[in-house]
Image (cartoon, grey):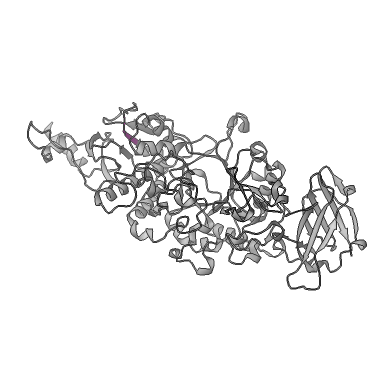
Amino acid sequence: MTSKLVLTSEKPYPLGCYIDYDRNLVVRAVFGDNERCGITLYPKSGNKKLKPLKIEIPKTLKRGDIYSARICGIEDIAEYESYNYFADSDVFCDPYAKQFFGLEKFGKDVPDDQIRAKLDNKADCKTSRDTFDWKGDEHPFIPYEDSFVYLLHVRGFTKSPSSGVTASKRGTFKGILEKIDYLKSLGVTAVELMPAYEMNEIENPYKSSDARSIKASAEKSGFLYSKDGSISNEASVNLKLNFWGYKKGFYFAPRTAYCENPSDAENEFKEFVKTMHKNGLEVIMQFYFDEHENGTLIMDALRFWRCTYHVDGFHLKGSIIPIRLITNEPLFTDIKIWNEWFNYGEIFEGKTPSLRLLADYNNAFLYNSRRFLKSDDNVASDFLKSMIANGPGHGIINYICDYEGFRLVDLVSYEHKHNEENGENNKDGTDNNLSWNCGIEGRTRKHEILDLRTRQIKNILTMLFMAQGTPMIFSGDEFGNSQDGNNNPYCQDNETGWVDWKAMDRNKEILDYVKFLVGLRFKYRILHEQEPFKLMDHISCGFPDLSCHGRESWRPDLSGHSHMLGMLFCGLYEQNEPFIYVCYNMNWTCQEMALPKLPEGLKWKLLSDTDKRGLKPEKPAAKGKKALPMTSLEEANKAFTELMADRSVRIYISEKDSSFSRKKQSKRKTK
């Protein structure tokens, strides 16, 4: 059959393979220095008559490392549904393919020659590009100051039966759709997906056909060298699951294992994005590129997902990312780009952009808030900087827990990692957790410990939502989902890596507090400004836009031993919103803290207290005697001083003082 084929030169770009409208096969692929290379076509699974068709592409059709050919004369071409490339004895998949066969079952180790790319047939007009209806889809584009990001693992989010999701949809994109009402009830505006592009999640460096990544020279002798240098045979190599997915993948294809109907993965992911948009939710995709990835492929992949799947932004991970190319791409002038850091001076060239598209996404807030929470010294100043950080011309994503590290409830329950189940002798994962177990390692029934843990969770959540940067939480942290002290469950496709939705019933108090904080943050503009605070009275109202305080009003203590901070948000800068005062006492003892004096006619109202004891200032005790509660007269004389419980946070809000007019009249009569 191959003797009848006619191969002619084709333009080298765009890379990929498909059946064109004239029913000829177009192949554009990158090959290295090989003696023989080409493509193998595989017939549809139901066709027993046709055999795989192997077509070698001659070097005369090579420009650079790109082989580009138009192949005419393939009989029954419509009966072929998949393909692979070959280079000498190696078989590999087209990195530009839009969908794959063989990876539909999560956690199954599939040989490379059994993973095949779907062959698109433009001639029959039945591709996803032709059939999916995007009509009515609108890009939400929610500004950073109005955003609340929810990071999740597609499979881990709903795979547990406790999720209540329809069984066939658990661990899939459709499973997320069944949780839309829940996400909206939290106030979430953007869902960030951990890697959801196609890949083989099994870590097996000794695949016999994978010579392109690691050439196991010992294959010929039947022996392999294991990681620690000892000699072993292939049967003794332990395969490991990469549950998170931070590895090289097929960057143009949605994950078939995350689909209810894997054979229709393209349309299923498009429907997912369209439904999220219909509900006002942005979809941000994480992409991990290793240091060997080609910059052209990275750009092509990002353009493809923006155009084909209408995603709202990318969180780029990897050591070598072509940031300048990405930020200069005209196609990306209306989507969000997140990275650990950007060289804004080089990118903006001294000009402030009209839209904030880029955002720093790093551990600065995590480190400073955790240290302040557990009463470390020499952190008050750094904590304040993290609380007010708000980039001019760019966003800042704040979080207290990411996918790696302790879950929020584990942050206050464990001081040491417990990663034994990962099979690496507890040597994996960071040892720098910046955590405190509140007195007992792990689970306990002691009420005072449990109450303190709940208080600490509320304390750090308050820090997150009262900071100026965009808040992000990891799925399940809002209701105390635990990983039992495992701070690196990258290989745990089980109850450890899945969200336990039963925790919602056990920790309703935490969930309710998150909803309270989200509601408060977005009710008042002064708590989520677009521009950084000037920290001065720039409208001559008598108050700075934001001011900092200590035990005494207007006297912040940012010394190395300070564990207290008050932040006064002046609502006069936002169309007469109220004053809001957030005060933090991370001391291990109760402390008095003065409230700043308000303008006449206003008084302070306690809005929330992470401590339930409701402490009030006490009279100084005489020697040998117990301190007594203050009388009403003494309270009046010391009206602006409050007693804060150890390790607690209070939020006050101003309200009209109904007795002010009576007091004013009384003063006039006295005169």
Camera-side residue of 523 and 601? 523
Residue found 77% across the figure and 50% down from its top: 15
Residue 93 percent across, percent down from the top left: 72, 55
Q: Quadrant of residue 116?
A: bottom right
Q: Quadrant of residue 655?
A: top left
Which part of the image, by quadrant, shows the N terminus?
A: bottom right
Question: Taking 501 as reference, is 247 above or below it?
Answer: above
Using residue 151 as the reference point, say whether residue 9 is left or right of it: right
Residue 563 painted magenta: yes
Residue 361 percent across, percent down from the top left: 52, 40
Residue found 58% across the figure and 58% down from its top: 273
Question: Taking 507 as reference, is 363 above or below it?
Answer: above
Camera-side residue of 142 and 259? 259
Q: What secondary structure do most residues of the magenta stretch adopt?
A: strand
State which region is magenta: 562-567
Residue 251 painted magenta: no
Q: Quadrant of residue 39?
A: bottom right
Residue 511 percent across, percent down from the top left: 37, 54
Using residue 361 as the reference point, say whether residue 369 is left or right of it: left
The reply to whether residue 569 is visible in this rendering is no
Residue found 90% across the figure and 48% down from its top: 60
Residue 335 percent across, percent down from the top left: 60, 46
The reply to whether residue 536 is visible in this rendering is yes
Using residue 136 as the reference point, say whether residue 580 is left or right of it: left
Which part of the image, by quadrant, shows the C terminus?
A: top left
Total marks shown come to 0
